[in-house]
Image (cartoon, rainbow, N blue to C red):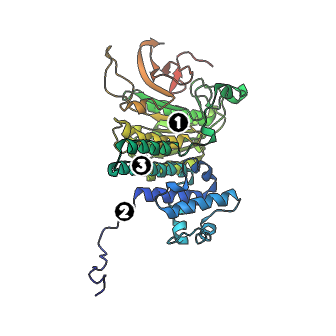
Amino acid sequence: MSDFDDVPPEDPYVTAVKVDPLTTAERYVIGAILADQRVARDVQTRLSPGDFHDMRLGAIYAGMLQMIGAGQPVDFLTVWDQLAAWDVRGIEVQDLSEWVSSVPTATSGAYYAGMVRDASTRRLIAAVGARLQTATGNPAAALEAAVDDLRRIRDVDTTEGDKVRWLRDVLDVPESDDAYDWVIPNVLERQDRLMLSAGEGVGKSTLLRQFAVLSAAGIHPFDFRPMDPIRVLVVDAENSERQWRRATRTLADQATQRGARDPRGNIGLHCVGVMDITKSRDLGRIHKWMDDVDPQLVVLGPLYRMVGGNPMDKDTEVSPVLAALESIRERDVAMLIEVHAGHARSTSGERELRPRGSSALLGWPEFGLGLRRNKERQWNRATYSLVRWRGDRDRRDWPTLVRGSSWPWEPTITTV
């Protein structure tokens, strides 16, 4: 009797086995480089061939890096031609082609590389723990060996560039190299992160729309002076396109008349409903939209509707959220993120404007501001302040605002 005689025939109604997220991430790394070999530069700063759980993919990754270094073209056909030379078996040209087409966007390759590297580190740590559990003989020697192993895991990526940097080396750079790379002059430069909170109905969504529409038209959103027009991507997880039409039609018309260009063709708008940017599919959608728009400013929010119900109360819950946001920021954009204020009250009875969440979330942005109505009035109109719920990482002068006559929000002291 054959060893296989008692194996039942395949049941066509059995639910398909789900692909492991790590397997998907490893394939996405390969697919991203196959789609655009330029991403290999960022990927290889995070990942080595030995980090792959599937050693075949590690061999493919190492081979592609060699091809790129030699100036050879890298695509699924040229790589497939090399598989036999790399002793890679069980992977066909169709697999490589599928990985290229399934990766959400090539520019997210570094993000998936980080996932692969984290999984590799966890495996190495687990192996150290297993050796400790099975160690015999001198416990002190086993512990010392484990410490050495953990130190090697920590230092495995140490390179020449990771050695100590003295202050003299840091300061020995022309001051011109430190000039601000403004996206919005005196407000946001590239890679700045601003989180804006407020109570319900105060007008933070209106303020964020003003940022997007005016800056895309070449109008400074606070002082209304001319500025270089920028491209903007807005991902709104709360408001519908109908609400955007009602709120911005007049604003866009007015900005077109007064600005350097029509903002409507320079703002990518996606009203998405609830999503989860810690999942590769949803984060990949955002990166794909960034590929389409090539923005200098990305406006997201509200954040709680973009993290799949994650309460973000613990550092472990916040970590994947920040990793996803960092993958967006690393594309050299400024970020405006809408967050909702908590319901706690200060000792004076005012509502706290810092959002709910762990300290890791609250400490992440360069600027954390809350829009609050003041007791003082100007011209018989209510005034609003942008109050800091965390200290600024760089100096900015945030204006006091009023509901405007020309624009939705205007500074209390008009500068033009």
Q: Is residue 304 above or below residue 75?
A: above
Numbered mark located on residue 122 in the image: 3
Q: Could you give the CA–CA distance between mark 1 and mark 3, rounded to whole angstroms?
A: 31 Å
Q: Residue at x 64, y 68 (%)?
A: 78
Quick check: 184 left or right of 123?
Answer: right
Classify 10 Å Cα crowding around label 1: few (below 14), some (14-19), many (20 and above): many
Pick the residue in front: 208 or 357: 357
Task: Give the number of the mark in front: 1 or 3.
Answer: 3
- Would you say residue 399 is visible in this rendering? yes
- Would you say residue 239 is visible in this rendering? no
Q: Earlier in the sequence, mark 1 or mark 3?
A: 3
Q: Amino acid at mark 1?
A: Met
Q: Could you give the CA–CA distance between mark 3 and mark 2, rounded to whole angstroms?
A: 22 Å
Mark 1 — residue? 335
Residue 317, horizontal then vertical, whole percent: 36, 40
Numbered mark located on residue 392 in the image: none
Q: Amino acid at mark 2?
A: Lys
Do the numbered discs 2 and 1 sit on residues whose CB atoms are within 8 Å?
no
Task: Give the number of the mark in front: 3 or 2.
Answer: 3
Mark 2 — residue? 18
Q: Residue at x 35, y 50 (%)?
A: 135
Residue 185, horizontal then vertical, whole percent: 63, 27
